[in-house]
Image (tube, rainbow, N blue to C red):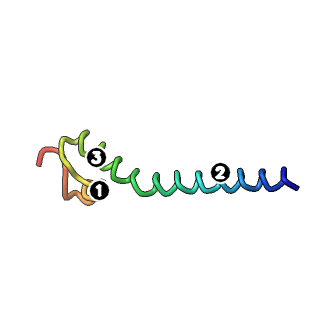
Amino acid sequence: MKEATGELNMTLVTVLAVGAILVFVTAFVPQILNKIQGSWTGEECTAEQVRNGQCTEGK
């Protein structure tokens, strides 16, 4: 019975760790991608601004 409890605890720790990584990724990746997009165009634009034509290279 102790072995089963230990495996359940490790499974729970793994699930919580994966959940924390997913929260981090969904929270910070869009901001990181916008920064990269801005550095490629030489401007600090969001991807949505670029798609809408509000912020283009040469402006």
- Residue occupied by mark 2: 14
- Residue occupied by mark 1: 51
Who is closer to the viewer here, 48 or 8? 8
- CA–CA distance between discs 1 and 2? 38 Å
Instruction: Please tell me whether mark 1 or mark 2 is closer to you in this view.
Output: 2
Residue 53, by quadrant, is: bottom left
Q: Mark 2: which secondary structure?
A: helix
Which x, y percent locates residue 20? 53, 55
In the image, what residue type sits under mark 1? Answer: Arg
In the image, what residue type sits under mark 2? Answer: Thr
Which x, y percent locates residue 50? 26, 54
Q: Earlier in the sequence, mark 1 or mark 2?
A: 2
Left or right: 16, with 35 as reference point: right
Q: Residue at x 60, y 56 (%)?
A: 16
Q: Residue at x 18, y 41 (%)?
A: 42
Residue 12, by quadrant, is: bottom right
Q: Mark 1: which secondary structure?
A: helix
Q: Earlier in the sequence, mark 3 or mark 2?
A: 2
- CA–CA distance between discs 1 and 3? 15 Å
Q: Residue at x 80, y 56 (%)?
A: 5
In the image, what residue type sits under mark 3? Answer: Lys
- Residue occupied by mark 3: 35
Which x, y percent locates residue 46? 27, 55
Instruction: Please tell me whether mark 1 or mark 3 is closer to you in this view.
Output: 3
